[in-house]
Image: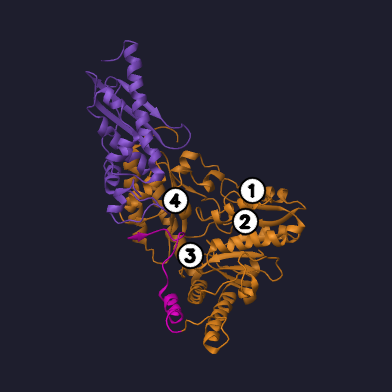
Amino acid sequence: MIYLDHNATTPLRPQALEAMLPYLRERWGNPSSPYRFGAEARSAVERARARIAEALGCQPAELVFCGSGTEADNLALRGAAQALRGRGNHIVTTAIEHHAVWHTCQALEREGFRVSYLPVRPDGVVDLDALTASLCPETILVSVMHANNETGVIQPVERIAALTRERGIVLHTDAVQSAGKLPLRLDRLGADLVAFSGHKLYGPKGAAALYARQGTPLAPLITGGDHERGLRAGTEHVAGIVGFAEAVALASAEVEAEAQRLGTMRDRLERQVVAAIPDAAVNGAAAPRVPNTSSLSFRGIDGESIVLGLDLRGICVSTGSACSTGDPEPSHVLLAMGVPARTAQGSIRVSLGRETRTDHVDATVQALADIVERLRGISSLGGEAA
Amino acid sequence: MDDEPGTEEQGLPEMAGPVIYYNETVLEHFVCPRNVGQLDDQETDGFGLVGDPICGDQMKLWISVRDGAIARIAFRSFGCPGAIATSSMLTELADGKTIEEAKRITDDDVVEALGGIPERKRHCSLLGVRALQAAISDWERRRAAGDGRP
């Protein structure tokens, strides 16, 4: 199997698994228990928190452990919206967010908040003029993702932070697709709330975190005990948190070298695809992108058919975000970039990772060329402008 | 699910989540679709085109009619694996049938012949049926206008 869907999930690093095992075997105590056996688990959680804080440049107390990136996004958006309700009811986000943010904003609309969904330019970068124009005295929260899950396009979060900070608006960014892929420093990024997840960076599923800058107003979604400073009740997933921290520390140590390696392979993939396959396009190529992600469009054929064709040859890629696979609607991200609906329907996402080698890339391009040719031989759109 | 015997046979999970699993028959028709192509103008007695011109799946279907029966059938399809496989199976069901028999082919017939299709892909099977009906209507129009073959 050639796995090129690392934006969906990544394999668990052996070191992360090793770090987790003691907390699944002998050290299974409850971190909230009042005896030394519990304190052992508590200490593991707090050491993990400190490791992540050091690796990403924040204070340990600014990290709230959650069960998933989606939960972290929910805590950020619903938690800040509820805490700030007395100050205003306007939220600003973009047309290209992951469903975790997009559908949560829609839910907040049903609760009476007004949400502006900002357009993006054809290169996939949010329009900063539109963002500035959308801010008003009622704006309490801005949420702009750091790197897009489908195209990899990086949003100018630092510049957006300058706009929100001077207006006293809380800024959230979904960094699930950038953490582990870019050198991430939370103290320099400028966002008040940052969501990131373990299983996207070779940690375990079920462990994620929300960075909440000290003093950021936030109400809990899950109430109960006083876990996570009252922001997320529930007994901590100790082993998951330990594995998550191990993965974050390892990813941070090697992020620059790995980014360069992946970027070189991604560029090789795109060069070969465009050379070998007529009417192929790379979406978001003009913008800065995380180095592992490639969004490719092929005229006249359907993305799901390409994905199945590759699957039958043992190659895993995706049509878009894993959450929307099977959705008959073309990617909202590509449509927001102005890609025509039929072209968006003929798109796939290839995302490289730690175990990807050059020969995987070359084999994938070869298989892709065969499949595209075969599907175009079936297509009713042959020869027409798609 | 009752309508997905194929996925059960393979021991795959039911289609509860976002992922779509196709059975072996559907996969086989996706990999080797029958009757792909198009008939040339002299051979074509009826042509059907269904699907939105801007977005979504699209299908073109050609029939050649001899003595009130479908003598040749061909299709081209832009769409998901479900659309390609159901189009292929539809042409296999319609090939050789009399026009009256072909008119009675339903999307359920196509799905049944494939041994089931994921619920979210059932709409695909309608595309082929509608294209066939459009091609038959075209044949009837041409015949009424006196430029079609019987």
What residue span does the magenta drawing correspond to?
A1-26
Q: The orange chain is which one?
A: A
Viewer-nearest of labels 4 and 1?
Answer: 4
Assess whether mark 4 and mark 3 are in contact (beta carbons under 8 angstroms). no
Q: What element carries label 3?
A: helix
Q: Where is residue A208 in the image (x, y as percent from the top left)?
A: 54, 68
Q: Which of marks 4 and 2 is in front?
A: 4
Q: Mark 1 points at which residue?
A: A118
> In the rendered structure, which disc, 3 or 4, sits on the residue that comes first in sequence?
3
Query: Which of disc 3 and disc 1 is earlier in sequence?
Result: 1
Horizontal and vertical percent position of residue A261: 44, 65
* Residue density around tag 1, few if under 14, some if 14–19, many if 20 or more, within 10 Å: some
Confirm or deny contact between disc 2 and disc 1 (CB under 8 A).
Answer: yes
Chain bearing tag 3 is A
- Magenta run includes residue A23: yes
Q: Position of residue A9 (x, y in %)?
A: 45, 62
Q: Name the residue under label 3.
A: A200
Please tell me which of labels 4 and 2 falls first in the chain.
2
Q: Residue A144 carries which label?
A: 2
Chain bearing tag 2 is A
**Label 3 Cα crowd, 10 Å radius (few <14 / some 14-19 / many 20+):** many
Q: In this view, does B99 lie to the left or right of A42?
A: left
Judging from the image, what is the letter of the chain drawn in purple? B
**Left or right of A295 on screen, residue B146:** left
Which amino acid, mark 4? Thr
In whole angstroms, how far apart are the C-alphas of marks 2 and 3? 19 Å
